[in-house]
Amino acid sequence: MNILVLEPYYGGSHKAFLAGLIHHLPYAFDLLTLPAHSWKWRMRLAAPHFAQVLAGDPLYAGKTFDRILCSSLIDVAALRGLLPSHLRTVPLLTYFHENQFAYPVQVSEARDVHFGLTNLTTALASDSLAFNSQYNLDSFLSGCQELLAKMPDMSLAGYKEAIRAKATILHPGLDFRGIDSCPDKRQTGRPPVLVWNHRWEHDKNPELFFNTLYGLAGQGVPFGLIVLGESFKSQPPVFVQAAQRLAEHIVHFGYAEDRQEYCRLLCQGDIVVSTANHEFYGMAVLEAVRGGCRPLVPDRLSYRELFAPEFRYHDGEFAQRLLTAMEAGRLAADEAQTLTSRFSWSELASSYQQWFE
């Protein structure tokens, strides 16, 4: 099977996802991509841009494909109408890493509903859909319903049923080889090491995490701290504050540029924490769990699909549950494997084959 991939945001989790597909599925992939920036421009104009490339580049002249795979940052409805004629009947599959109804906006911005509407027409125009979590699909349909309730003198009867009928849930596969190959060099008798490995943005609610740690430090509770994750020009000020106030607890604080170093640091942790107000999947926590970290995550968002209730906390009980997790300590190696194996590419590849075929 020959698959054309159109990805206008080729970086981060989107890039890792495609690398996994290419490595684990027995197909020939042809990637047409754009760098991972300017997402709003990508979402508006990637469709005509890719259509123009496919029509004008001699590399694609007369070339045929069995499937076209798009990410949810492509306006598939526009793409359908703009593709060269010989590609317009090729089945179009769309993978939703996120949806623009539930994706967090900057604190200072109002939500532009047109991006959500583009997701809606993309879902309607695609032949088949996959969402990375049930939470992603449910929040997408809820956002559609809420917005379309305001629609004057028009009707989109049956849109929910049509979308559900062609949608499936496919978690993005994870490659655990780097983590599995980490040597165990943890010191015995040390205090528990807490891991934070999320984007340094407000939707990850770092204030709850660090304010809780200030309280623990003030009570003399011993702990180490590893802070990872990508930071940006604009970041919550609590990170600068935490680096100063928790300096004596810090094992590492900042983005790990090297994948091997990132895996090594995860394997040094004991507890991995999420305080997120938003999460479509939870890849970062799963990677840390594979390294042996005991998860502590909110009892909401996509985490309900990933972890049993014993690893989830309700709002208002985070501090107490964190202390309990610290007392319990790291996961046993077999427990870490059991919790994460079903999310590996080796386990998920066959489900992706079924989706494509």
Image (cartoon, rainbow, N blue to C red):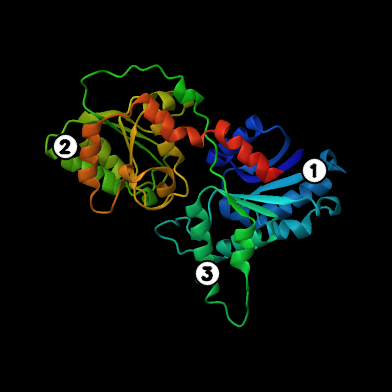
Tell me if I can see residue 269 in this picture: yes
Q: Which residue position is annotated with label 3?
A: 145
Q: How many numbered markers are drawn?
A: 3
Q: Earlier in the sequence, mark 2 or mark 3?
A: 3
Image check: 318 left or right of 351? left
Residue 217: mark in rendering = 2
Front residue of this view, candidates 38 and 308 = 308
Work out whether 238 lies above or below 345: below
Residue furthest to the right = 62
Nearest to N terminus: mark 3 or mark 1: 1
Residue at the (21%, 26%) spot, across then down:
191
Type of amino acid under label 2? Ala
Q: Position of residue 3 (x, y in %)?
A: 74, 41
Give how far across and how far down residue 338 sits, in percent: 42, 32
Q: Tell me how far mark 2 sits from mark 3, CA to CA.
A: 46 Å
Query: Taking the image as drawn, is residue 255 in sight?
Result: no
Q: Residue furthest bottom?
A: 153
Disc 1 crowd, CA 10 A, few/some/many (<14, 14-19, 20+)? some
Which element type, helix, strand or loop, lies under badge 1? loop
Q: Position of residue 312 (x, y in %)?
A: 32, 46
Q: CA distance from mark 3 to mark 1?
A: 35 Å
Q: First in sequence: mark 2 or mark 1?
A: 1
Residue linked to disc 1: 65
Q: Looking at the picture, which amino acid does disc 3 mark?
A: Gln
Left or right relative to 52: residue 75: left
Residue 329 vs residue 237, the one in the foreground: 329
Task: Check disc 3: other Cα within 10 Å, few if <14, some if 14-19, many if 20+.
Answer: few
